[in-house]
């Protein structure tokens, strides 16, 4: 798909860049004034700031640049030259207007949009300005000659290359703007390249290294050739020169036509004929007036190698490839490779050694015949490819046994294809070419914009420079990244018909004017010197002293000034530096890791705290829920017990009433013993009385007997006291028994109090106040019972220990004890408990502690207490199942169900439950 050429040169003029580049002044330059939109956009190198700077400031800045008083950054700026070509005859006849391009001074150009231009249309709508001001390193008008242009642009570059620097010059502009004319020339008007070649060889007179044994390879390496390879190089070189000679002799005859290999472009050599008019480079005598050989390094010879290739439709073709004669319709493409340091180079590119300007000229001419030209609507002989001519200079020291190249420098001249509108191409092939050309120029623009962004925003993360997005930018990458410096030549055609395209090309170049060069090889020399000074501080001064000299000389020198030992030393220092930086980075990484870990730990502990809080909240929530449940249970129990008490009180009342009635009836019987109607009733009463008396007597007998037996038992125990260890244990057991008796006594008292409370329970329940007291009394009794149980347990244990001694020593005691047991009354059943008074409770409490058959069993719950307070059963875990079933109360039911099915949520601790209960 054809690339739309709204930006005719295909350059990246996105909004951001435009905002950053364009500076506007409020100067009135005629035309309708629109509020808020300046009339002129001013585009100048070195104006990196926004908002706009007023024009007077610009003038001051420009003057400062001219006087060389700018800061260090300005010195290193990329040079951008503007060349305006004159109108061709055809254009003049067509009546092209010229008023749109005006040179204000040597550095400033003013563009005024012509009426019919797109720019004027948008300006009228208030979107853009109709006038633009651009600044350049130098502007060359239509009248400037090739000689003048060479003097101001390339002459110094040639000198730099001979001093070991790398230089790139590339032309940029709309198609038909004079790029090829500038680089190669036309007719006898030699362009920059032939002039540079001529100048180079003139400077190297007497210093040329003619042998073919050293050849440049890859990015910037040199290879020593063996004799066979030297022969091959010789043949290739001669065949190229011979071919050029043959073609020149057949000038005006058949032109060679090569196929691009990918579909049809014919590279007609008609352009070449323009230059073939001259067999040799025609240079003005003053252009080579001075020879610079004097300031070249002593003892160094120079071997010059050239390569010529083009990038056509994103394919690389070697223009000096001698093989086309073998396969005339097909050209081999070249590949781009990286050396071991990642530097890109054109693989298998033919490098030809040249020994004179004449030879170089012939090689260039031979290559141009292979170049891709075609006729477009704008240019009869339009370059359809980017052509790159490279000159490599090997700095050779021949005095050693085998010659060695100590350094290699390069001068590259790139004639970029012109940008153009795709839609105006009627031929499909031309459209495809235009598309590829515009795409690669767009990539160049993006690279330059990214470089400028990175240079202007050093504090921010660097943007990726998209060198890899096109072959052209990949090939030239090194010159933008410190391998050397680059200069740009912007060619423009002053015709108003091509104004919009020219404006876009100038905007592109405005970005390039703001670029700063990377560190040059000179600064590398200074850096190496600084490295060599460093070991001097450690006592290794000998080498350094050799190198040290006048500081300014050193700064101007190149890397060849160092001997091998010094360079090795510098490498050592660099290695140490690398090592140091690695260690620093390791430490940094360790610190970062530590920080990350501590931050993670903080996060984790925060989470832990959060979880603990949540847990606490959950816990308290559950507690509250259980409190509520317990309150409900208590409420229910209270109600239940109140009901129970009421019923029992009613029963007691009924019984009391019946008793009172019986007692009241008794005197009547006594007073009327002979009444006939009273006969059976009286006999029944008498029977009851007798029975009652008998029971009383029996009870008294039991009591008396129990008292006697107890006393007897005490006496026997006194007698059974034995010496030794068992005696101590027995004493302890006795003490505990006494404690148990005391506690039992206390229990009896409590039960008596409880009985009294029960008496008042009737009233208390009605008033809803005695329930609490009753509950407290129950709790106290429960605690006392628990204590008692514990003491009895201890007692039991003590008795088990004592039993062995007792068995051995007191058989008689066993018999007596058996007798004593036989005197004890049987335990009452729980069914009778409801009617037992507090007084009867005493006897039963004592009876539980006394029997010996209970010694090895856990103490049983008091039947009386069970009958009185059946709800206490849940707290006594040693109750039998039968007892539990017999005393099923609401609380026991609840607690039993809890024991059977444990709660899902964490249950409250038994302690808290017990306490609450
Ligand atoms: N400074 C100049 N003086 C005289 N004639 C010039 C000048 N510059 C260019 N021309 C002429 O303008 C025409 C176009 O120039 P040229 O072919 O160099 O343009 P171009 O930019 O290389 O075009 P393209 O990009 O299509 O290859 C040629 O006929 C050339 O001779």
Image (cartoon, rainbow, N blue to C red):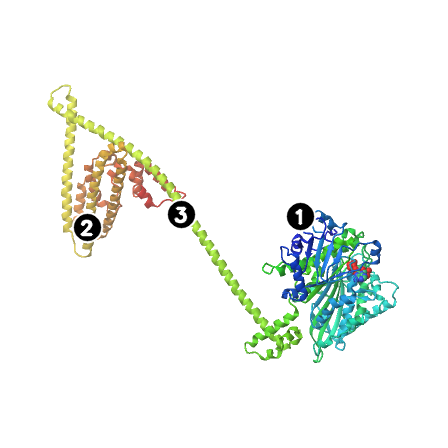
Question: Reading the chain from its start, which is encountered first: label 1 or label 3?
Answer: 1
What label sits on residue 35 in the rendered view? 1
Say which element carries label 1: loop
Q: Residues within 10 Å of mark 3 (few under 14, many from 20)?
A: few
Q: Residues within 10 Å of mark 1 (few under 14, many from 20)?
A: few
Whole-Å distance between the Cαs marked 2 and 1? Answer: 116 Å
Q: Residue 691: image x %, image y %?
A: 16, 30
User: What quarter of the picture does the C terminus occupy?
Assistant: top left
- The residue singled out by tag 2 in the image is 735
Q: Nearer the viewer, residue 231 or 812?
A: 231
Above or below 915: residue 695:
above
Residue 374, quarter of the rendered image: bottom right
Residue 412, quarter of the rendered image: bottom right
Above or below 862: residue 425:
below
Say which element carries label 2: helix
Q: Are marks 2 and 3 in contact (CB under 8 Å)?
A: no
Select label 1 or label 3 by which is in front.
1
Q: Residue 172: image x %, image y %?
A: 74, 60
- The residue singled out by tag 3 in the image is 616
Q: Is residue 848 left or right of residue 110?
A: left
Whole-Å distance between the Cαs marked 2 and 3? Answer: 47 Å
Q: Nearer the viewer, residue 51 or 557?
A: 51
What label sits on residue 722 in the rendered view? none
């Amino acid at each position: 798909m054809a690339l739309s050429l709204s930006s005719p040169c295909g350059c990246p003029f996105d909004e951001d860049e435009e905002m950053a580049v364009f500076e506007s002044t409020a100067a009135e330059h005629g035309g309708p004034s629109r509020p808020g939109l300046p009339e002129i956009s001013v585009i100048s190198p070195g104006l990196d700031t926004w908002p706009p700077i007023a024009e007077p400031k610009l003038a001051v800045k420009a003057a400062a640049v001219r006087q060389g008083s700018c800061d260090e950054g300005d010195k290193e700026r990329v040079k951008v030259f503007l060349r305006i070509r004159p109108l061709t005859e055809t254009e003049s006849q067509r009546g092209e207007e010229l008023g749109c391009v005006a040179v204000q001074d040597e550095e400033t150009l003013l563009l005024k949009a012509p009426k019919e231009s797109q720019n004027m249309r948008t300006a009228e709508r208030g979107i853009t300005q109709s006038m633009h001001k651009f600044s350049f390193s130098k502007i060359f008008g239509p009248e400037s000659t090739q000689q003048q242009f060479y003097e101001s642009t390339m002459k110094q570059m040639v000198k730099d290359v001979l001093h070991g620097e790398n230089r790139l010059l590339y032309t940029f502009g709309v198609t038909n703007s004079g790029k090829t004319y500038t680089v190669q020339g036309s007719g006898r008007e030699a362009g920059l390249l032939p002039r540079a070649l001529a100048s180079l060889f003139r400077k190297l007179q007497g210093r040329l290294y003619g042998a073919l044994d050293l050849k440049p390879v890859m990015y910037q390496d040199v290879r020593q050739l063996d004799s066979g390879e030297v022969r091959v190089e010789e043949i290739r070189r001669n065949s190229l020169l011979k071919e050029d000679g043959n073609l020149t002799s057949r000038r005006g005859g058949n032109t060679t036509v090569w196929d691009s290999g990918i579909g049809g472009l014919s590279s007609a050599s008609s352009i070449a004929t323009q230059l073939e008019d001259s067999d040799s480079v025609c240079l003005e005598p003053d252009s080579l007036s001075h020879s610079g050989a004097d300031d070249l390094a002593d003892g160094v010879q120079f071997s010059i190698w050239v390569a010529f290739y083009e990038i056509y439709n994103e394919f690389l073709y070697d223009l000096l490839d001698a093989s086309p004669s073998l396969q005339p319709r097909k050209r081999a493409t070249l590949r781009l490779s990286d050396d071991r340091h990642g530097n890109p180079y054109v693989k298998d590119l033919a490098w030809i050694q040249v020994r004179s300007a004449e030879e170089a000229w012939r090689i260039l001419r031979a290559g141009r015949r292979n170049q891709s030209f075609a006729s477009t609507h704008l240019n009869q002989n339009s370059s359809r490819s980017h052509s790159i001519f490279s000159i490599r200079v090997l700095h050779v020291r021949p005095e050693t046994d085998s010659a060695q190249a100590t350094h290699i420098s390069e001068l590259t001249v790139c004639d970029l294809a012109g940008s153009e509108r795709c839609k105006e191409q009627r031929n499909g092939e031309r459209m495809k070419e235009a598309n590829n050309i515009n795409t690669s120029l767009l990539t160049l623009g993006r690279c330059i914009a990214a470089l400028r962004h990175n240079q202007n925003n050093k504090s921010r993360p660097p943007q990726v420079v998209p060198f890899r997005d096109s072959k052209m930018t990949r090939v030239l990458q090194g010159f933008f990244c410190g391998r050397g410096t680059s200069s740009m030549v912007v060619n423009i055609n002053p015709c108003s018909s091509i104004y919009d395209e020219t404006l876009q090309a100038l905007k592109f170049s405005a970005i390039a004017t703001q670029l700063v060069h990377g560190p040059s090889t000179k600064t590398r020399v200074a850096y190496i010197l600084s490295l060599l000074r460093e070991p001097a501080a450690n006592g290794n001064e000998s080498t350094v002293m050799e190198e040290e000299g006048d500081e300014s000389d050193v700064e101007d020198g190149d890397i060849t000034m160092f001997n091998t030992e010094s360079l090795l030393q510098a490498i050592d220092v660099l290695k140490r530096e690398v090592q140091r930086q690695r260690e620093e980075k390791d430490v940094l990484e360790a610190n970062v890791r530590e920080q990350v870990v501590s931050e993670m730990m903080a996060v984790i502990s925060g989470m832990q705290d959060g979880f603990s809080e949540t847990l606490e909240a959950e816990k308290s929530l559950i507690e509250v829920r259980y409190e509520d449940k317990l309150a409900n249970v208590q409420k229910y129990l209270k109600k239940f017990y109140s009901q129970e008490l009421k019923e029992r009180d009613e029963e007691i009342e009924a019984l009391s009433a019946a008793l009172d009635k019986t007692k009241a009836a008794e005197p009547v019987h006594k007073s009327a013993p002979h009444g006939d109607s009273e006969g059976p009733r009286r006999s029944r009463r008498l029977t009851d009385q007798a029975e009652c008396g008998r029971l009383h007597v029996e009870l008294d007998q039991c009591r008396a007997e129990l008292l006697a037996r107890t006393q007897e038992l005490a006496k026997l125990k006194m007698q059974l006291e034995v010496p030794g260890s068992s005696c101590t244990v027995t004493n302890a057991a006795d003490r505990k028994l006494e404690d148990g008796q005391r506690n039992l006594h206390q229990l009896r008292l409590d039960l008596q109090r409880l009985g009294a409370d029960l008496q008042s329970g009737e009233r208390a329940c009605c008033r809803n106040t005695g329930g609490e007291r009753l509950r407290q009394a129950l709790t106290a009794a429960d605690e006392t019972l628990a204590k008692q149980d514990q003491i009895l347990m201890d007692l039991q244990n003590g008795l088990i220990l004592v039993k062995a001694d007792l068995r051995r020593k007191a058989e008689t005691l066993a018999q007596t004890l058996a007798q004593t047991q036989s005197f004890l009354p049987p335990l009452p059943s729980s069914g009778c408990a409801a009617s037992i008074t507090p007084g009867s409770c005493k006897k039963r409490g004592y009876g539980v502690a006394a029997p010996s058959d209970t010694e090895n069993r856990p103490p049983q719950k008091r039947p009386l207490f069970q009958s009185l307070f059946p709800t206490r059963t849940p707290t006594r875990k040693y109750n039998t199942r039968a007892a539990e079933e017999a005393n099923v109360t609401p609380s026991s039911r609840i607690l039993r169900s809890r024991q059977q099915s444990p709660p899902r949520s964490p249950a409250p601790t038994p302690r808290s439950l017990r306490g609450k209960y």
